[in-house]
Amino acid sequence: MLNDIETGYEGKYDFPQRSEGPQRTYLLASLPRAGSTHFSHVLWRTGCLGAPLEYLNFQPGGPYGFAAQSPEMQLELWRSVLRRRCSLNGVFGLKVFSMQLDHLQQSNPALLDHVLAVMLPREKARHIVYLRRRDRAAQVVSYARADLSGVWRKDQEADAISIAYSDEALEAAERGIAFQESVWERMFNDLRLEPLITWHEDVLADPGAAAEQVADFIGVTIDPTAAVTVPEIEKQSVGDSADWLARYARSRGE
């Protein structure tokens, strides 16, 4: 958990605990800097689409980093969130990056098997929402700058951040995004699943419509009276992003 920062993983944001597992599940397949934190909170706020956060993020500094070295604790945390992070209509959502699944395959394959059995069950409908970003240049620049600075959220910022421009960082970000896209595409093909593709720009333009689209996809109705309070997600400072974008465009001959 991030020190002195409200992340949404705190117990006060839990739904009432269930005695049984989820009735419906969906996977929010994410890419770096595609607005997945904002979108997950848009879906969560409805009170009808679970609370699709990164419950498999056991990396140091992540929400469950304290369990990084304990496969047993990771499994217990997973079982716990299945009971307390379902919305009242029985929906459970999980936001995940492909690299998190890969890390689990290496470090805790038993947990990965359990996750896939719940999220992509063979005997039930399987739902994947795939969040992407149309503005690739902005995505690459944002990823490179966040990776260099270590600042991934507004509430991690101390002051306006100026970061030395780096062609190497941008090239690494380009490769990283393309690789993670290819991993998701292979997974969708292997599972013979057609995900619901949602675009970051569309979520920003009309978050309510984006949430309705997801609800229709998984087969539930959003009840306005079920809305819940979730932590606000503030937009990060732009800093010198415009300069990075201009230089990046010139490097590509645009």
Image: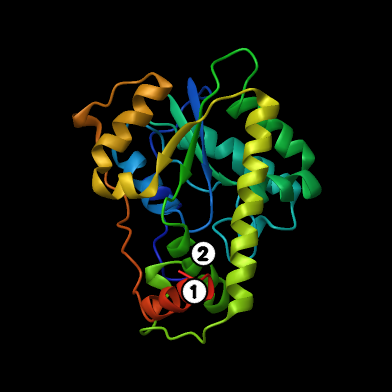
Q: Tell me the residue at 67%/25% (across/down).
A: 191
The amino acid type found where label 1 is placed reads Tyr
Please give left or right for residue 244 compared with residue 45 in the image.
Answer: right
Which image quarter holds the C terminus?
A: bottom left
Of circles 2 and 1, which is in front? 1
In the rendered view, would you say 166 is above or below 8? below
Q: For the residues labelled 2 and 1, say whether their Cβ atoms are less than 8 Å apart.
A: yes
Q: Is mark 2 on a helix, strand or loop?
A: helix
Neighbor class of circle 1 (other Cα within 10 Å; few <14, some 14-19, many 20+) is many
Q: Tell me the residue at 38%/49% (across/down).
A: 200
**Distance from Cα at disc 2 to Cα at disc 1:** 9 Å
- For the image, the number of numbered tags is 2
Q: What element carries label 1?
A: helix
User: Which of the two labelled residues, at mark 2 and mark 1, occupies the earlier sequence position?
Assistant: 2
In the rendered view, would you say 221 is above or below 3? above
Instruction: Answer whether residue 115 is visible to the viewer in this image.
Output: no
Residue 196: horizontal and vertical position, in percent? 46, 31
Rendered image: mark on residue 216: none
Rendered image: mark on residue 140: 2
Please give left or right for residue 161 compared with residue 171 in the image.
Answer: left
- The residue under label 1 is 248
Instruction: Tell me the quarter of the picture where residue 87 sits.
Output: top left
The amino acid type found where label 2 is placed reads Val
Residue 154: horizontal and vertical position, in percent? 37, 69
Residue 59: horizontal and vertical position, in percent? 65, 60
Between 116 and 144, the one nearer to me in the picture: 144
Q: Tell me the residue at 29%/21% (across/down).
A: 221
Between 32 and 215, the one nearer to me in the picture: 32
Q: In the current view of this chain or complex, which residue is farthest to the front? A: 253
Instruction: Tell me the quarter of the picture where residue 173 sits.
Output: bottom right
